[in-house]
Amino acid sequence: MRSFITGPVLLSIVFGACGDSELPTSPASGTDALPGETDVLGKTTLTPPPGLALVDAALTIDQTLVNPSISIVDSDARILFIFLKDRGLFTISAFETSPAQVAGSFNGSEVAIELDGTTIQIVNASDPLVGDGSKYPAWVIRFADFPMFAAGVDPADLVIGLVTEPRQIPGWDRQ
């Protein structure tokens, strides 16, 4: 399996376009949520701080261990993206985005989602994935035919990374 994990060099290029995030962080309107909280599917949850940390994390797809040790940390990231050559792009965030749907949760050192027949689980060796490790809904969008790679390029089977905004995902400008 050919895989590519975005590292510091690619992330520095990707983060070159950083600007104000398009992802909402304020409380949902029209709810009884307290400041710093959002109402998600009738449950009040704390708004997570920005930043994602995959530290010696194991990636499992459909109950098959794909990579036993992934380490990527970004203190500003809000989106974890996973591109699977045969299934497309999955964006996973603890922040509500449109048209994302809740398809799992961040819980301590783990994120687990299930969407369109694909189950993805990432488990950190010890550190929480988001903030202090509180439980947050996982907002997921799947792009089945995402153009991660330019025409004529032999695509990797797996690409995983962290970004602040969707437009920072490689290939976003080609869709």
Image (cartoon, rainbow, N blue to C red):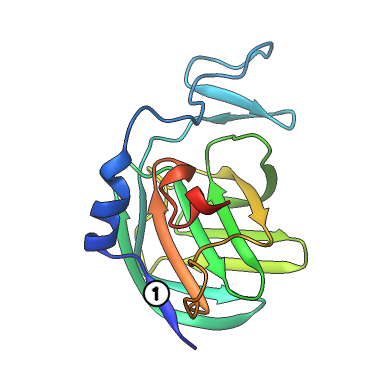
| Residue 23 vs residue 114, the one in the foreground | 23
Residue at x-position 38% and y-position 37%: 50
Which percent across, then down, holds residue 46?
A: 51, 30
Left or right of 15, for residue 115 = right
Left or right of 171, for residue 16 = left
Residue at x-position 53% and y-position 37%: 95
Outermost residue toward the right in this view: 117
| Residue 134 vs residue 170, the one in the foreground | 170
| Residue 28 vs residue 148, the one in the foreground | 148
- Vertical comparison of 87 with 133: above or below: below
Helix, strand or loop for disc 1: strand
Check disc 1 and give the amino acid type: Phe
Which percent across, then down, holds residue 52?
A: 38, 50
Which percent across, then down, holds residue 2?
A: 45, 85
Residue at x-position 54% and y-position 66%: 83
Residue on which the image places disc 1: 4
- Vertical comparison of 161 with 32: above or below: below
Left or right of 32, for residue 91 = left
Q: Residues within 10 Å of mark 1 (few under 14, many from 20)?
A: some
